[in-house]
Image: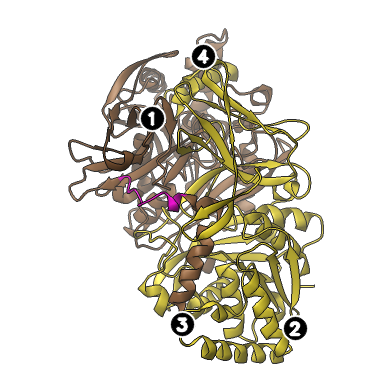
Chain colours: A yellow, B brown
């Protein structure tokens, strides 16, 4: 058969579906358009709009009053209306290589860019993304290299008496060889879930690219859901999703730390992994960094590599309203001393110099210095943002299992 | 440590991130709210909007003029503005159990519901979804049953000289036992990609639930990308994504049919599968239905089960502008005769009675009757829509490998 003719028919088929109506709205809008020189044009067809702006982390941050104090939030830029009600904004200067997030604001209403299907959910918000090529953007892009596999599945947690969803990256070749691999447990922050590191964290792309470059050892990366009040990410759960922040009664009684043994047991009985300390790493961002410190102290002879990104390892020191701060901190420091005696290869702490947790990280390290706990500290610019966490992952992974 | 206090700190952490700004916009909006009696309320905070409507397949379809003729498209309903600029619409009657898609239209601009993170991309549009419980809604929901795994990975296609992305469902228990399984190849339509059947198709939920009910045999479901001009879904590709419809030069020379052997070879060398005809099924919707007919005819002693959903098995008969229609049809009918002689268990054709391809399906079956080709036909109400394809999958899968 001559397929071109069939394809014409197929076009009509697809166009008749509900989702395709957008195709009939006139000429296609290209947005964002990344120009040769890395300036970017954003476009939106909105003939009835009075004011259209774009906000995103590609714009200079602006200090903003919030219910929680003053924070640097992404700035906004106004689009100008042109022919056919198409609004447009071009960045005045080229953008540095990076993965950026943005949304439009149309007469006060935040909306996604209908011309860009690249969208990533973070917590309960969905934003559009785009990548400016170069370094580090290329590291976050799907390149023509061998790719690992990313599986979403459910494991049994006897401790929490439920099935829980988990995301696992296996390196290229895992399914077709018989090797065993080291395991890297990678934990999300308080706003995240089992999709966070694979989505905005770009874990699969970072691992694929660094493995292809020979900079990272092939390993299995395990990304569980760190909120025990949920079994899975929103809209992926078998029961009503509870907003991740704020926790709930279950969070208090059965924490991620208490049930983490279930995750390890599942991985070690379902994957071809090396089951010794030398081949286990754990790291996380923000709440996940605190989890990593707490879990590696609770299982004090289990992980040879620990990464604490943008979080104080001694989280108890932060609990200012808690009568037992001193006692709890003392208890945790004792655990650290056991961990230190047992030995490990790397305890890596990374933080941005404008992170609102910066001082708590410094305080933690002072306490660790007092007991002679051997950590490595890496300080970056900027604050509590995905840009930093992607960089930390790209720096931490090459140090593992070597 | 007392975790509640840490959680309060964590809330601030999360709230300070870009994506969390929405949390500060006042009280949370619940949308959609599914009431006890299955009426549904949609809400949107848009104080500056002049007109807000909702459109979706839960509303009665309306005949609409399009560049391709008159089609039934989802209707719209207007929201009314209430206190605080919150617009609201409640369905006048309970909705039947189903998975529905919808978007808002604010002063002519289509936007997603910012209160609902359940969004599914179909082709180049992203719509919100919700499920009304009951039958068949429960079949499409994540229930408290054993879950299979869904992996996204890349396979090598020597025919197309590239790596291509693929989605594979393995049934509960696959990773922890040593059984071999039958394989079901499930193909998307012209507007889809390797995410289509797992997204709006709800394949993982349908399989999980029907396997748990003992109605479907545990099997591996393989969902490749059927557009050879792309290697992967938009924003998942290593090169620029080409709109799926319209095709390109590569489509004409190296079709899905020609390269399908690469998919089978990959699956049979990377998964524990039974490698005989009795344990192979192939089905697809629309273009994927045509692919299924063409592939099962091209490999005429390979599949014991063939499903053609909402598509004419003899697609060549549709190619009206093609001089070789008669010849091509004759050639294809010869292939069907070989397939018939080789034998198979089930050749299942399903179509909706308002499908715009309905007549071409009827014409195909007339031709098949002429040569005594044994198929089973199942006719449903309505047309070329996901609602039907989910039902067809739920009806087809229980007939396989028995």
Q: Position of residue A99 (x, y in %)?
A: 67, 46
Q: Mark 1 to mark 4: distance in Å?
A: 37 Å
Q: Mark 1 to mark 2: distance in Å?
A: 58 Å
Label number found at residue B229:
none
Q: Does residue A100 appear to the left or right of B91 in the view shown?
A: right
Image vertical order of residue B269 relative to residue A27, above or below: below
Q: Nearer the viewer, mark 2 or mark 3?
A: 3
Task: Mark 4 and mark 2 in contact? Answer it, CB < 8 Å.
Answer: no
Task: Mark 4 and mark 3 in contact? Answer it, CB < 8 Å.
Answer: no
Q: Which residue is mark 3?
A: A322
Q: Chain of mark 1?
A: B
The mark that comes first in sequence, 1 or 4, is 1
Q: Mark 4 to mark 2: distance in Å?
A: 73 Å
Label number found at residue B105:
1
The mark that comes first in sequence, 2 or 3, is 3
Q: Nearer the viewer, mark 4 or mark 2?
A: 2
Magenta region, main secondary structure: loop
Categorize mark 3 by other alpha carbons within 10 Å: few (<14), some (14-19), many (20+).
some
């Amino acid at each position: 058969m001559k397929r071109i003719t069939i394809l014409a028919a197929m076009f009509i088929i697809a166009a008749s579906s509900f989702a395709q109506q957008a195709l009939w709205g006139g000429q296609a809008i290209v947005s964002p358009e990344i120009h040769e020189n890395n300036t970017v044009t954003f476009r939106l067809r909105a003939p009835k709009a009075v004011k259209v702006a774009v906000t995103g982390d590609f714009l200079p941050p602006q200090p903003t009053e919030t219910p929680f104090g003053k924070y640097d939030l992404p700035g906004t830029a106004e689009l100008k209306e042109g022919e056919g009600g198409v609004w447009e904004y071009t960045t005045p200067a080229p953008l540095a290589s990076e993965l950026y997030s943005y949304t439009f604001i149309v007469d006060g209403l935040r909306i996604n860019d209908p011309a860009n299907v690249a969208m990533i959910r973070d917590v309960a918000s969905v934003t559009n993304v785009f990548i400016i090529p170069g370094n580090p953007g290329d590291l976050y892009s799907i390149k023509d290299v061998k790719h690992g596999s990313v599986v979403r599945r459910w494991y049994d947690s006897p401790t929490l008496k439920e099935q829980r969803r988990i995301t696992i990256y296996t390196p290229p070749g895992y399914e077709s060889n018989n090797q065993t691999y080291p395991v890297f447990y990678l934990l999300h922050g308080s706003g995240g879930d089992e999709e966070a590191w694979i989505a905005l964290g770009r874990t699969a792309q970072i691992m694929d690219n660094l493995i292809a470059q020979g900079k990272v050892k092939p390993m299995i990366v395990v990304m569980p859901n760190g909120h025990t009040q949920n079994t899975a990410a929103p809209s992926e759960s078998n029961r009503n999703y509870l907003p991740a922040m704020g926790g709930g009664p279950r969070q208090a009684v059965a924490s991620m730390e208490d049930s983490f043994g279930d995750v390890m047991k599942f991985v070690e009985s379902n994957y071809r992994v090396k089951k010794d300390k030398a081949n286990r790493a754990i790291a996380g961002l923000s709440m996940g960094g605190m989890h990593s410190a707490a879990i590696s102290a609770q299982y004090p002879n289990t992980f040879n590599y620990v990464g604490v990104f943008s979080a104080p390892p001694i989280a108890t020191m932060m609990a200012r309203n808690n009568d037992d701060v001193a006692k709890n901190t003392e208890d945790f420091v004792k655990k650290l001393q056991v961990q230190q005696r047992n030995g490990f290869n790397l305890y890596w702490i990374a933080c941005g110099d404008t992170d609102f947790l910066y001082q708590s990280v410094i305080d933690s390290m002072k306490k660790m210095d007092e007991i002679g706990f051997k950590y490595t500290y890496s300080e970056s610019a900027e604050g509590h943002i995905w840009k930093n966490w992607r960089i930390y992952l790209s720096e931490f992974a090459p140090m593992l299992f070597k």
